[in-house]
Image (cartoon, rainbow, N blue to C red):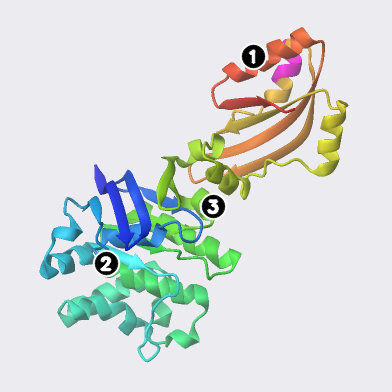
């Protein structure tokens, strides 16, 4: 089942097209990443989900409803089920942590005893039960973002929209926030749609990823497929930030000189490359040198590359390359 479906969504602002015929589906219970450079249309896309933006063309379906067709009462109801986590927290400095978290419930007229219970549960889930009476200025950036997550969770949403939630955080805090989002997804089954320009964020938590460029969807696939076999030029550039493909210059010189033999790049998924060197040498009597290696742990698997130098008569090297190409989980490319 789908939580969110974008069907031929276009959004124009006068002569500017922010989104151009975007179509994809976010499965219920998944963590779906949308990645792109600044100005790609990511935030505009996210805001169509809770009705803050209306498509110029096409349809967005959210939990079986079209936000663009809802009256204000219907939008308020939908927004209790579709919560949002912001990049810069958006906390009120004059209110305590608990009061900030309680705000969506108070605006909805929830009874005080229910507010207190749900605020306590939300703060406990994000690890801030002991900070309920602090002010935001007394918290670190990571703790403030946890308050923002608790505020989003307090309405018991079915979908979480995350607008660059870690871009203002240091790497260690970023990892902690991403791990928290994964636990929320796994424990509560909440669908998470996260937009970012950081491909390492996608690698760490997402099941699927859509790549936007100039408002257009240029690629859309499971994360492991994107990392193993990126098709679009922009996608390859993003993947390169996590799994570098460029060889160190000293190694590149050796490859160009021919001293490294027949050089191949082997992209491997889910540990499929673990015994490649041993198997090639044993099966085809080919000397295989490991020249370079990279590895990226994804949420559910790993993707990495091995650069091998193969030394043997041409026929045996050809047989080895054919065998490698036939193995599940391996993609082989001979480097010039």
Q: Position of residue 193 (x, y in %)?
A: 36, 55
The residue labelled by disc 1 is 322
Q: What is the number of the mark on residue 52?
A: 2
The residue labelled by disc 3 is 199
Whether 215 is among the magenta residues is no
Q: Position of residue 102 (x, y in %)?
A: 27, 79
Residue at 34% in and 57% down:
45
Q: Earlier in the sequence, mark 1 or mark 3?
A: 3
SS majority, magenta: helix
Residue 180 falls left or right of residue 170: left
Residue 26 falls left or right of residue 265: left
Residue at 19% in and 59% down:
67
- Could you say which is closer to the camera, residue 268 or residue 134? 268
Q: Disc 2 vs disc 3: which is toward the camera?
A: 2
**Identity of the residue furthest to the top in this view:** 315
Q: Disc 2 vs disc 1: which is toward the camera?
A: 2
Q: Is residue 160 visible?
A: no
User: Label 1: few (<14), some or many (≥20) within 10 Å?
Assistant: few
Q: Is residue 92 visible?
A: yes
Q: Which quadrant holds residue 317?
A: top right
């Amino acid at each position: 089942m789908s939580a969110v479906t974008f069907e031929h969504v276009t959004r124009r602002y006068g002569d500017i097209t922010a989104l151009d015929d975007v179509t994809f589906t976010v499965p219920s219970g998944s963590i779906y990443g949308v990645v792109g450079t600044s100005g790609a249309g990511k935030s505009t896309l996210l805001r169509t989900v809770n009705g803050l933006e209306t498509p110029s063309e096409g349809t967005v379906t959210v939990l079986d409803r079209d936000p663009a067709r809802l009256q204000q009462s219907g939008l308020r109801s939908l927004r209790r089920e579709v919560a949002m986590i912001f990049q810069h927290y958006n906390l009120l400095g004059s209110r305590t942590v608990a009061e900030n978290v309680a705000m969506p419930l108070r605006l909805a007229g929830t009874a005080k005893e229910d507010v207190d219970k749900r605020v306590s549960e939300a703060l406990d889930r994000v690890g801030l039960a002991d900070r309920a009476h602090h002010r935001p200025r007394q918290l670190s950036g990571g703790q403030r973002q946890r308050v923002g997550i608790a505020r989003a969770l307090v309405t018991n949403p079915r979908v979480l929209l995350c607008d660059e939630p870690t871009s203002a955080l240091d790497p260690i805090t970023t990892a902690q926030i991403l791990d928290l989002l994964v636990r929320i997804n796994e424990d509560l089954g909440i669908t998470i749609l996260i937009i970012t320009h950081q491909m390492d964020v996608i690698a760490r938590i997402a099941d699927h990823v859509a790549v936007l460029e100039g408002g257009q969807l240029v690629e859309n696939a499971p994360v492991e497929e994107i990392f193993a076999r990126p098709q679009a030029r922009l996608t390859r550039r993003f993947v390169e930030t996590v799994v570098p493909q460029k060889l160190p210059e000293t190694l590149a010189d050796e490859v160009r000189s021919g001293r490294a033999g027949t050089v191949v790049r082997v992209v491997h998924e889910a540990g499929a490359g673990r015994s490649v060197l041993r198997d090639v040498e044993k099966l085809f009597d080919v000397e295989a040198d490991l020249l370079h290696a990279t590895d990226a742990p994804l949420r559910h698997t790993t993707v990495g590359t091995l650069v091998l130098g193969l030394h043997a008569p041409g026929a045996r090297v050809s047989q080895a390359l054919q065998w490698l190409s036939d193995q599940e989980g391996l993609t082989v490319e001979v480097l010039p």
